[in-house]
Amino acid sequence: MTRRSAFRSASLPLLAALMALGACASSDEAPDLMRFRNNSTHPDEFVVVPSKPLQTPDTNTLPVPTPGSANRADQTPVADAVAALGGSPAALGRSGIPSSDSAVLAYAGRSGVDPQIRDTLEQEDIDWRKRNNLRPVERILNIDGYYDAYETMQLDQQAELERMRARGVIVPAAPPAVLKPE
C-alpha cells in the first residue's frame, strides 16, 4: 500500500465524521458568527465591581424608593469618565433628538418612515448569516466567521482612495495597504 492510498483511506472516515458533525447544527436559530467564550476555569475578575461608599442622606427623611431606578451606591463608569474629562454627567440622561439635528431628521424622513424597520433589518441579517454561515470544520475548530460572512460588503479603502483622487477630490493620506497572505 502506498502512502497516498493509505492517506486516502484514512481521510475518508475523518471526512465522513466531520460531515456528520456539521449536519448536527440546528438551522432554526440565527447563526452565531461571533464566538466569545471564557473557557477558563479561573474566576473572571471583571465580573466583580466594587460599589461606591455608602452615603448618609442630607436630611432625616429617606428618598422614596423607585423600582428600576439606579442605586446611589452603584458604579457609573461612563458618567464618572465624563465628569473626570470636564463634561456634564447630567447630559447623559437626556433623551430625544437635539434641536440641532431637526433638519437632518426631517431630511432623512422625507420619504416616510417604516415603523418595522428594525424587525425587517434583523430578519434580513439573520437570512444573510444563514446563507453565509460557517462550514462545519470552522464550527468545530471554533473559528470566528463574522468578518468572512460580511467580507463582500466591506469597503476597499485603497480602491476608494484612488477613485476619489481620480475625480479630483482632495483626500487625506490613508494608511498603507495591508498585504493579505495568499
Image: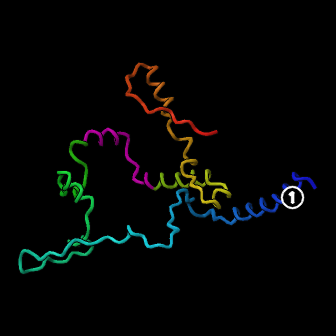
- The amino acid beneath tag 1 is Ser
- Residue at screen point 25% across, 64% down: 76
Is residue 117 within the magenta segment?
yes
Res 19 → quadrant:
bottom right
Q: Which residue is at the far left?
A: 59
Relative image position of residue 39 (x, y in whole percent): 53, 68
Q: Answer with the quarter of the image where residue 65 lies.
A: bottom left
Q: Is residue 73 magenta?
A: no
Observer-nearest residue: 101 or 149? 149
Residue 104, compared with residue 97, is above or below; it is above
Instruction: Please state the horizontal and vertical placement of residue 98, each as a whole percent of the image.
Output: 22, 47
Q: Which residue is mark 1?
A: 9
Q: Work out which quarter of the rendered image holds the C terminus and state it.
A: top right
The residues colored magenta run 102-118
In the visual, does 38 lie left or right of 4? left
Write the residue at 17% across / 54% down.
Answer: 88
Q: Residue at horizontal 27%, vertical 58%? A: 78
Question: Nearest the camera: 143 or 7?
Answer: 7
Regarding mark 1 in the picture, which secondary structure is present there?
Answer: helix
